[in-house]
């Protein structure tokens, strides 16, 4: 059999659809590689090789598909580009970031298996190298809302002093108490891990959370937790023995959805973008199983921010719009403000100035109605400091640097003590903005504050901010204000992992 390569006509058709030359595709792939921490140097010659049938090593095929997805305004898979192993040309395959099945037991098993592979030294390396790939955006409208009926039944039962379902004996009562206790444990863990992430970043914290989920999520999905009651068997996950929301497990699914969401955010903060995308998809599926539109929308919002950071502005807009459309129309104002300010940032990065301004105004107005109450957990309130930081990202994308600096200063004033990661990144963003405005002395003051907070944080975002500091201060490295800052930055760079 001949070993000659077969020309990749599918990639050629996609280049024609995109209206790109080979050099333009190469530049787009190089730019995405930079966002993934890869120093790629492709040119039109490399693209000519791809068109002739050569397949680059991973993660380059995924970056090619991502670049074409953004350019064509639709999902382009690696297979459709003719770059997958055993590729047979165009075809639709499940993409990363897709939500886990609505079956909560399957979602938990997927979470457990993913976390188990994540903590295994042998299977972890390819997971950490997996690239981000734009995936289909989930439907914003749920086909049915079974939770409304269950909530109505529960409310009626509370008023009459009866329990819904057929099982009313001690086994069912014990199962419900077990579920309530487990849900409380998950809430406490979410609070603890969120606090660690805000304080010290995601690099080391995520490993601890993944290890816990690898053991607990799988054990919970595999064992019968609802007792032998017939009602539980009727409403649980078929063949799993895991109770569904009708058996009082909605809070458990919600708790696992929150932990999967946190693990996704920590993983993205560590620079492992393909793996983070998988955890985001699992969190979506568990939020759906919990019948929790709010948590579902919050996860879509995080996915939008992740896509935007990785050079996918059109995909970020689609995700942000779906998040707003999915959220309960009568939802808590703080949640709606949280979703709208991300949609504003996504619109700004996509060059949609009017839409971004409208979303910012709406987010500010809604946050003014947000009840300032002590939160029960990390997903229960939205701090003004976080809103101001997100507002600054929108202003920066629009080139409105004075407004961005003002928002960042307000964010710093509202930061809670001990939030080293958020504080460090806010000081860095403000320093970069002030330098753009020509205020070198003030910029160096905030860079000094950044360098003071940064040693306590293990975060890819902080590491990248340090790299930008050294780059931006290179023209000023001999000025009186910058000399000590550059020395501090170089010393820190030698110590960070």
Image (spheres, rainbow, N blue to C red):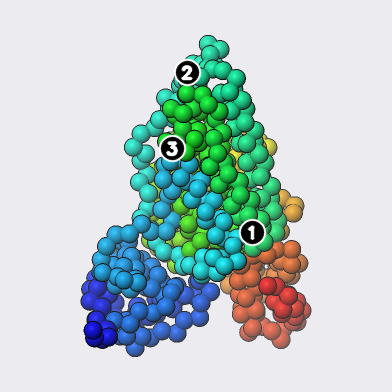
Left of 265 or right of it: where is 455?
A: right
Position above or below: 48 against 217: below
Residue drawn at x 54%, y 17% is: 168
Q: Position of residue 337 (x, y in %)?
A: 52, 44
The residue shown at (51%, 69%) is: 126
Labels 1 & 3 near each other (Cβ < 8 A): no
Residue at 60% from the left image edge and 55% from the top image edge: 210
Give the numbered dot on residue 59.
none
Residue 31 lies, in percent from the top left, at: 45, 76
Among the two numbered marks 1 and 3 on one chain, the one whose residue lies closer to the N terminus: 1
Q: Which residue is mark 2?
A: 166
Q: Residue lying furthest bottom in this view?
A: 45
CA–CA distance in space, label 1 to label 2: 42 Å
Q: Quadrant of the C terminus?
A: bottom right
Vertical relation: 67 (above or below) 155: below
Mark 2 nearby-residue class (10 Å; few <14, some 14–19, many ≥20): few
At label 1, counting other C-alpha atoms closer than 10 Å, the crowd grade (few under 14, some 14-19, many 20 or more) is some
Q: At numbered mark 2, what does the secondary structure look like: helix, strand or loop?
A: loop
Give the labeled residue for mark 3. 239
Q: Nearer the viewer, mark 3 or mark 2?
A: 3
Specify the label residue 207 is tagged with.
1
Quadrant of residue 411 within the rendered picture: bottom right
Regarding mark 3 in the picture, which secondary structure is present there? loop
User: x%, y% of residue 192?
Assistant: 69, 47
**Residue 279 showing in the rendered view:** yes
Quote the CA–CA distance across marks 3 and 2: 20 Å
Which residue is at the front of the view, 109 or 459? 109
Q: Is residue 14 left or right of residue 61?
A: left
């Amino acid at each position: 059999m001949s070993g000659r390569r077969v020309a990749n006509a599918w990639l050629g058709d996609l280049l024609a659809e995109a209206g790109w030359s080979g050099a333009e595709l190469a530049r787009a792939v190089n730019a995405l590689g930079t966002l993934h921490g890869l120093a790629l140097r492709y040119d039109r010659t490399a693209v000519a090789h791809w068109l002739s049938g050569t397949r680059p090593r991973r993660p380059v095929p995924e970056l090619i598909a991502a670049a074409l997805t953004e350019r064509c305004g639709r999902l382009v898979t690696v297979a459709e580009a003719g770059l997958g192993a055993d590729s047979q040309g165009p075809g639709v395959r499940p993409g990363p970031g897709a939500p886990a099945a609505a079956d909560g037991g399957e979602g938990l098993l997927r979470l457990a298996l993913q976390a188990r592979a994540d903590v295994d030294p042998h299977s972890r390396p390819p997971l950490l190298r997996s690239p981000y790939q734009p995936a289909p955006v989930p439907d914003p409208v749920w086909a049915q809302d079974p939770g409304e009926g269950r909530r109505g039944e529960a409310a009626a039962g509370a008023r009459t002093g009866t329990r819904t379902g057929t099982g009313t004996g001690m086994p069912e009562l014990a199962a419900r108490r077990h579920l309530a206790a487990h849900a409380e444990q998950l809430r406490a863990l979410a609070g603890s891990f969120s606090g660690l992430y805000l304080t010290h970043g995601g690099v080391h914290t995520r490993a601890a959370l993944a290890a816990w989920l690898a053991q607990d999520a799988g054990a919970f999905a595999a064992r019968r937790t609802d007792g032998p009651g017939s009602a539980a068997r009727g409403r649980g996950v078929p063949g799993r023995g895991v109770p569904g929301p009708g058996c009082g497990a909605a809070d458990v699914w919600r708790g696992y959805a929150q932990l999967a969401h946190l693990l996704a955010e920590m993983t993205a903060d560590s620079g492992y973008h393909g793996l983070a995308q998988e955890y985001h998809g699992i969190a979506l599926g568990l939020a759906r199983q919990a019948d929790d539109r709010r948590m579902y929308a919050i996860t879509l919002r995080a996915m939008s921010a992740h896509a935007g950071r990785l050079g996918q502005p059109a995909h970020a807009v689609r995700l942000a719009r779906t998040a707003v459309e999915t959220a309960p129309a009568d939802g808590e104002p703080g949640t709606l403000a949280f979703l709208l300010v991300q949609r504003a940032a996504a619109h700004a990065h996509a060059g949609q100035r009017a839409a971004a301004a409208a979303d910012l105004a709406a987010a500010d107005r809604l946050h003014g109605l947000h009840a300032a109450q002590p939160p029960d957990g990390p997903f229960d309130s939205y701090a003004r400091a976080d809103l101001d930081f997100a507002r600054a990202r929108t202003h920066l994308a629009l080139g409105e640097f004075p407004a961005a600096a003002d928002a960042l200063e307000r964010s710093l004033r509202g930061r809670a003590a001990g939030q080293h990661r958020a504080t460090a990144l806010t000081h860095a963003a403000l320093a970069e903005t002030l330098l753009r405005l020509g205020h070198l002395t003030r910029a160096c003051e905030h860079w000094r504050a950044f360098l003071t907070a940064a040693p306590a944080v293990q975060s890819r975002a902080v590491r990248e901010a340090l790299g930008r500091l050294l780059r931006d201060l290179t023209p000023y490295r001999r000025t009186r204000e910058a000399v000590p800052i550059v020395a501090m930055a170089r010393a820190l760079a030698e110590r960070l992992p």
